């Protein structure tokens, strides 16, 4: 999402900022519906937010013949300009009677004077191709004579391809189409409707990234009338219809199918602007043209064309579309061809006594792999009652896997358990393998299924190792590709592992999870921009799968926002997610959200909240049977230091000892800085910072080091550590932690100031007082009378200009 909530136009919005900063001329170009008006509206909003005057006109074709119509729309009133110029301008725009012909040069000069008088001003012309010639000449004149003036000109022009600049010196920006993910986001934001990826791809094959066209087609089963008007008049005959029915039309293919001379009709289509001919290749100028020509033809004409194509082509699709009614030979050919479209046609052509069940399940599997989970679910819910034996088991396995993505792990596991009785040996192993994943809230049950799966599915060994690690069993020697080791591994290895799998994945539903994992890796690598991009892509992918909450992507985005300093928004998302997951029994999801909340609490300096959130997380892990959390969701990462900060040293020490034992048994890089920070917080001794840690972990440790050195009355060393931490955190743009480092630096400065004003004895008394000791306790510790203690405290108050122990605590720190 770009600035102002605009989808997919970050680069264009950056150019708008540049335009306003440099007050020049920018021409936006692109076809109708590509988003020029949206970018123009964003520019107007930005200019007004800066306090600029905005002058705007949007000419129409009917206004092109009216002299100075655009100028009249731009200037509803005039600032102070010379009287001669004002008179000429008012006559030109029909605001004063004309006693003599108006001098165009004076009108143009008046426009320049008016623009200069307005101060910072943005002039906007949307659809400049319809601007009247007189206004066009005036603005051309003005654009060449406003150098140095705070005037920016933004022009939008509808065009099929980049054209010559309309005026003097200017920059041009061509608006390309949006990506399929961005088109999905446009529909989702404007219609509240998520489209499966295959649907997005099918529509975009026609729309070519055009968001307006995509929106119109997404809301209709047929091509909307508004788009039909964009297609030039079509010549009669079957040549263009046959070309539209072909995947890659050629002149030779058309001649073979029609057994006729096709040159005349091809040339007519070329002259109409419908097609382009390049040697043997025939291409429609826009995919919409082929869609309309095919869609407008009557069904008998289309069938006749496909029958002709079937005679000269090996594409079984033409056989299916050229015959009426079922045909088992045709259905079998289509099934053998595979793919969603062919399998859908195969099912439609299957006779009543044919192998319908097999084709239903094959189609459902293909729909699932393509990412159209809604269509697969609807098909199976209708057909499963009529299936039996292994086919029923296969259908339930696909339906349960869909439930894993769209509903809950509980529903998914129940469906797969019900399939076991009908499964053959091979399918039984696959069911056990998936159940070992779906029982994420009961790891003992997951372990039972993983062990059962390994016998027939060696690939399940990696998941068995993962579960056994979670259960606290000795880790097995497994290949480095095991996903949970990649999550807990070094950044480079993890990035390579997940990137390779994303590039090679043929299973669309797995992409959302892989994108989340890559986002986690980039977050660990301190690359917030990349992490946020992955979170956004993962959210889109999850919505396209029909996931109601896209929890993994939401949790990652909340964590990224927390790192960026937007703690309020991140906390709201994480609290809602944790509460929702706990209410539905999805404890593994709740643990992920609680990790975000614990980090937010740590970033806010709230150790009590850290302990509360990590306590909830720990209870969930115990319920699930997890002794060794994998994937950096370990509550100990924040909990140990929080306990120590609250003075609960015994608890903190015990938890640190347990964490160190786990590290010794199963070491992972991220655990090292956690142990170092925990040891230092418990002991009060300044920790050493390793350059092997990530930048954020180094900075976080330096903040702690500076705090401990300050308390140890080493202000110079404390300031050095905190200054280094502030520098790192500023470069990372981790705003909350930047403020934390600066606050610690301020405390060091106050301590130095206080130390310079107080005597050594007064300093010692003040340090004990701010720990919460009573006067009698301080006196006993320093072997002096209570009255003497009170005298030192009173003198300290006078020297420091304060009046209470609370103020003394803030000064001494």
Image (cartoon, rainbow, N blue to C red):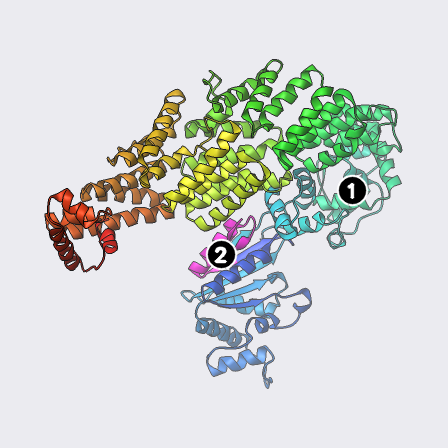
- Tag of residue 730: none
Between the residue at mark 1 and the residue at mark 2, the CA separation in whole angstroms equals 44 Å
The answer to which quarter of the image holds residue 710 is: top left
Q: Position of residue 575 (x, y in %)?
A: 50, 45
The residue located at (52%, 41%) in the rendering is 578
Q: Which residue is mark 2?
A: 16
| Residue 733 showing in the rendered view | no
- Tag of residue 266: 1
| Residue 505 vertical position relative to residue 241 in the rendered view, above or below | above
In the shown orientation, is residue 388 left or right of residue 169?
right
Q: Secondary structure at mark 1?
A: helix
In the shown orientation, is residue 81 left or right of residue 35?
left
The residue located at (52%, 59%) in the rendering is 43
Q: Main secondary structure of the magenta part?
A: helix
Report the mark closest to the observer, 1 or 2.
Answer: 2
Per the rendered image, the range of residues in magenta is 1-26
| Residue 723 showing in the rendered view | yes
The answer to which quarter of the image holds residue 706 is: top left
Q: Secondary structure at mark 2?
A: helix
Q: Nearer the viewer, residue 163 or 201?
A: 201
Q: Position of residue 718 (x, y in %)?
A: 22, 42
Q: Position of residue 533 (x, y in %)?
A: 50, 41
């Amino acid at each position: 999402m770009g600035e102002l909530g605009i989808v997919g136009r970050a680069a264009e919005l950056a150019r708008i900022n540049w335009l306003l900063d440099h007050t020049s001329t920018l021409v936006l170009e692109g076809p109708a519906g590509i988003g020029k008006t949206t970018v123009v509206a964003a520019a107007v909003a930005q200019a007004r937010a800066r306090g600029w005057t905005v002058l705007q006109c949007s000419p129409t074709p009917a206004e092109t013949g009216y002299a100075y119509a655009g100028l009249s729309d731009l200037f509803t009133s005039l600032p102070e300009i010379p009287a001669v110029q004002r008179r000429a301008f008012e006559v030109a725009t029909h605001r004063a009677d004309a006693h003599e012909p108006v001098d165009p040069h004076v009108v143009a000069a008046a426009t320049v004077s008016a623009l200069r008088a307005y101060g910072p001003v943005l002039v906007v012309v949307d659809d400049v191709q319809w601007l009247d010639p007189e206004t066009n000449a005036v603005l051309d004149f003005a654009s060449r004579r406003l150098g140095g003036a705070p005037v920016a000109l933004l022009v939008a022009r509808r065009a099929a391809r980049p054209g010559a600049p309309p005026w003097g010196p200017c920059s041009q920006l061509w608006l390309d189409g949006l990506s399929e993910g961005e088109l999905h986001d446009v529909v989702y934001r404007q219609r509240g409707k998520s489209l499966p990826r295959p649907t997005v791809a099918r529509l975009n094959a026609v729309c070519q990234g055009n968001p307006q066209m995509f929106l119109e087609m997404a809301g209709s089963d047929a091509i909307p009338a508004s788009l039909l008007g964009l297609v030039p008049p079509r010549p009669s005959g079957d040549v263009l219809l046959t070309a539209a029915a072909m995947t890659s039309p050629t002149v030779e293919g058309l001649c073979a199918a029609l057994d006729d001379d096709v040159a005349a009709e091809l040339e007519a289509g070329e002259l109409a602007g419908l097609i382009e001919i390049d040697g043997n290749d025939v291409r429609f100028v826009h995919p919409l043209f082929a869609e309309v020509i095919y869609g407008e033809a009557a069904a008998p004409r289309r069938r006749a064309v496909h029958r002709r194509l079937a005679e000269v082509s090996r594409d079984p699709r033409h056989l299916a579309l050229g015959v009426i009614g079922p045909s088992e030979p045709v259905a079998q050919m289509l099934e053998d061809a595979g793919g969603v479209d062919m399998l859908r046609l195969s099912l439609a052509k299957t006779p009543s006594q044919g192998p319908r069940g097999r084709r239903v399940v094959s189609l459902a599997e293909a729909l699932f792999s393509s990412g159209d989970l809604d269509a697969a679910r609807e098909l199976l819910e209708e057909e499963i009652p009529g299936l039996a034996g292994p086919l029923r088991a296969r259908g339930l396995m696909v339906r349960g896997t869909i439930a894993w993505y769209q509903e809950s792990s509980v529903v998914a596991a129940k469906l797969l358990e019900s399939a076991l009785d009908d499964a053959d040996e091979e399918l039984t192993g696959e069911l056990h393998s998936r159940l070992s994943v779906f029982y994420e809230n009961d790891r003992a049950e997951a372990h039972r299924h993983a062990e059962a799966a390994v016998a027939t599915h060696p690939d399940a060994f990696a998941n068995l190792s993962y579960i056994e690690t979670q259960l606290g069993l000795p880790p097995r020697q497994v290949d480095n590709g095991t996903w949970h080791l990649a999550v807990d591994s070094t950044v480079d290895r993890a990035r390579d592992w997940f990137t390779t799998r994303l590039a090679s994945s043929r299973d669309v539903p797995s992409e959302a999870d892989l994108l989340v994992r890559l986002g986690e890796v980039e977050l660990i690598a301190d690359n917030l921009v990349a992490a946020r991009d992955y979170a956004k892509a993962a959210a889109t992918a999850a919505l396209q799968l029909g996931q109601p909450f896209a929890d993994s992507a939401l949790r990652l985005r909340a964590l990224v926002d927390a790192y960026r300093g937007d703690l309020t928004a991140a906390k709201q998302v994480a609290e809602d997610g944790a509460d929702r997951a706990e209410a539905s029994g999805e404890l593994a999801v709740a643990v992920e959200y609680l990790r975000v909340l614990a980090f937010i609490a740590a970033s806010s300096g709230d150790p009590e909240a850290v302990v509360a959130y990590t306590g909830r997380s720990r209870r969930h892990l115990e319920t699930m049977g997890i002794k060794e959390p994998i994937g950096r969701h370990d509550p100990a990462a924040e909990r140990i230091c929080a306990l120590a900060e609250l003075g609960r040293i015994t608890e903190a020490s015990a938890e640190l000892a347990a964490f160190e034992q786990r590290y010794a048994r199963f070491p992972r890089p991220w655990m090292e800085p956690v142990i170092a920070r925990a040891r230092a917080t418990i002991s009060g001794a300044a920790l050493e910072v390793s350059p092997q840690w990530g930048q954020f972990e180094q900075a976080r440790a330096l903040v702690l080091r500076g705090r401990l050195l300050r308390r140890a009355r080493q202000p110079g060393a404390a300031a050095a550590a905190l200054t280094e931490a502030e520098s790192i955190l500023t470069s990372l743009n981790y705003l909350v932690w930047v403020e934390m480092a600066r606050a610690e630096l301020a405390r060091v400065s106050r301590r130095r100031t206080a130390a310079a004003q107080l005597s050594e004895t007064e300093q010692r008394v003040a340090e004990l007082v701010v720990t919460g000791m009573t006067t009698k306790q301080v006196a006993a510790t320093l072997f002096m009378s209570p009255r003497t203690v009170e005298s030192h405290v009173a003198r300290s108050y006078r020297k420091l200009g304060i009046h209470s122990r609370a103020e003394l605590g803030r000064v001494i720190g």
